[in-house]
Image (cartoon, grey):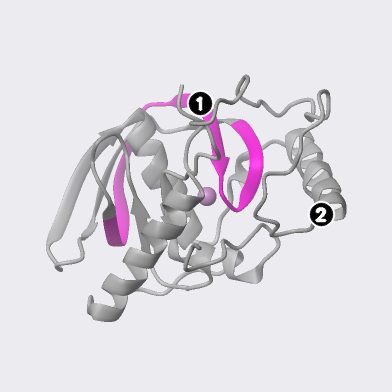
Amino acid sequence: MAPYRIRIFGDPVLKRRAEEVTEIDGRIARLAEDMHITMKEAHGLGLAAPQVGVSRRLFVYEIGNSGPRTLVNPVITERDGEWEHEEGCLSVPELFFWVTRPQRVHVSGYDLDGREVSIEAEELEATLYQHEVDHLDGHLILELLDDDQRKQAMREVRQRAVTGGPGSRAPAPRAPGTRAPGTQVPGPRGPAAGTGEGTASQR
Ligand code: NI
């Protein structure tokens, strides 16, 4: 069983600006480890501490063959270009949206050994960093949608709350044709697809 329950849209911790990590100690390492497990079990690519109810500035992720990684006190220092893609969030389960974000970013922060990290990333990886830093600033993907998209998404979220209960960990059954117009959901999902935090399902 995952060490943490993932907080779902509507939980106030997701709207709070997370606090800086002042000391990278054993507690932070343990938190990161438990977050990795939680993320993997949810089939996510990234997970920010507020999503497990901890209002601290760090997130975990795994992209390609990177293995588990953690970024503490991350700061995006440069943004460049434009990239449109399908993006999902473990805190807004089962919904995917077309979102436009900067294509390239420079992010810096610290790893779990307290070493300074500086990363140039683009496209999928750049999106992941932006998505997770947004979480640390109290922002959700829903805020990037236009009004119509957001209303449709809210409707779906509420409908799920009635049928499955918010925070229900089991994937909500999706009847054909229930997709909100204006939201884009990746095609048929194979077992490997899952809810990709920070990105659409693997394609
Ligand atoms: Ni997210």
Task: Please give the label number shown on residue 85.
Answer: 1
Q: Position of residue 51 (x, y in %)?
A: 52, 62
Mark toward the start of the polypeptide (1 vs 2): 1
**Residue at x 77%, y 34% (from the top left corner):** 174
Quarter-of-image position of residue 187 = top right
In the rendered image, which residue does mark 2 sit on?
Answer: 161
Q: Residue at x 21, y 38 (%)?
A: 120
Q: Is residue 72 magenta?
A: yes
**The residue stretch that appears in magenta:** 70-97
- Would residue 80 be visible to someone looking at this image? no
Question: Where on the picture, by quarter, is residue 13?
Answer: bottom right
* Residue 117: x %, y % from top left: 16, 54
Name the residue type under label 2.
Answer: Ala
Q: What x and y, as percent, mark residue 122?
A: 30, 31
Q: CA distance from mark 1 to mark 2?
A: 27 Å
Q: Residue furthest front?
A: 1
Q: Residue 115 in the image: x percent, y percent? A: 12, 63
Please indicate whether residue 27 sits to the left or right of residue 174 in the image: left
Disc number placed over residue 137 in the picture, else none: none
Secondary structure under badge 2?
Answer: helix
The reply to whether residue 141 is in sight is yes
